[in-house]
Image (cartoon, helix red, strand yellow):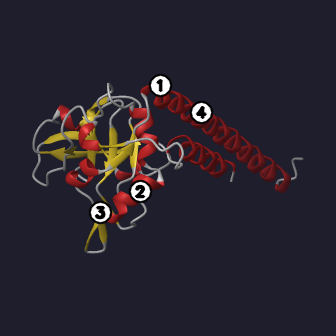
Amino acid sequence: MWAATLDELLSAEFERRFETPARAVAARRVSELVAKPLRNGISPASNGLIPGEVLTLSAISGVRFDPSQRKTAMFAAQHDMNRTVAARDLLVTRGNGNRNLVGRGQLVGTSAPSVAFPDTVIGVTFDEQKVLPEYAAFAWNRPSVRRQIEAGAKTTNGTFKINQQLVESLEIPCPAFDEQKRFAELALSVAERRIDGERRASALDSLFASLQHRAFAGQL
């Protein structure tokens, strides 16, 4: 409940700063903001002979990037470094059975050059002279960008899909660099508080379970 409230407050602050009619900032296409071409990830090969690790979609389907969600598979060749997990890249889901989840993006925190991202994911590397990745990653999942993604998604066999061309055409509000930095710092602070709150909640759950067990065992 409290985590959802934090998210709502941060989203409202983003809208207030950058999307209200009186303060709306110019938007720029993703194609203008990237440092190198978009790319899809790597698929395991049924007849592959080279073992390697690859992320699963679970790595980017939660509230934050989770690098532990990976698997070992066989590949036809050594991983292309351009398709491995790199810090500050945005990883975007290409397809999902739920329209609300297709195109969701998560920012990579730490590089893992031995781990590929799958072909169901598009890798985006932002030009940091034009946009801060931390800011862009937050803007990516806001309603103004989500509407563009969902409007452009195509349905194939019950799965909503997007491609690189659609991603390149998406428009993101781009305020002045110092404003991006201030908002990114705010978003990071909120994320840290959320993580701390989750840890505290987990500790309380563990304590409750322990006390409950001891009570049933007559140890209290």
> The residue tagged with tag 3: helix, strand or loop?
helix
Residue 146's tag is 2
Residue 152's tag is 3
> The residue tagged with tag 1: helix, strand or loop?
helix
Residue 192's tag is 4
Asked whether, in this view, residue 1 is left or right of residue 146, the answer is: right
CA–CA distance between discs 3 and 1?
A: 31 Å
Q: Residues within 10 Å of mark 2 (few under 14, many from 20)?
A: many
Q: Three-letter amino acid code at disc 1? A: Asp
Q: Three-letter amino acid code at disc 3? A: Gly
Tell me which residue sits at (36%, 68%) in the image: 97
Label whose residue precedes the other's in the sequence (4 or 2):
2
Foreground: disc 4 or disc 2: 2
Label whose residue precedes the other's in the sequence (2 or 1):
2
Q: Three-letter amino acid code at disc 2? A: Arg
Q: Residues within 10 Å of mark 1 (few under 14, many from 20)?
A: few
Question: Which quadrant would the N terminus be assigned to in this image?
Answer: bottom right
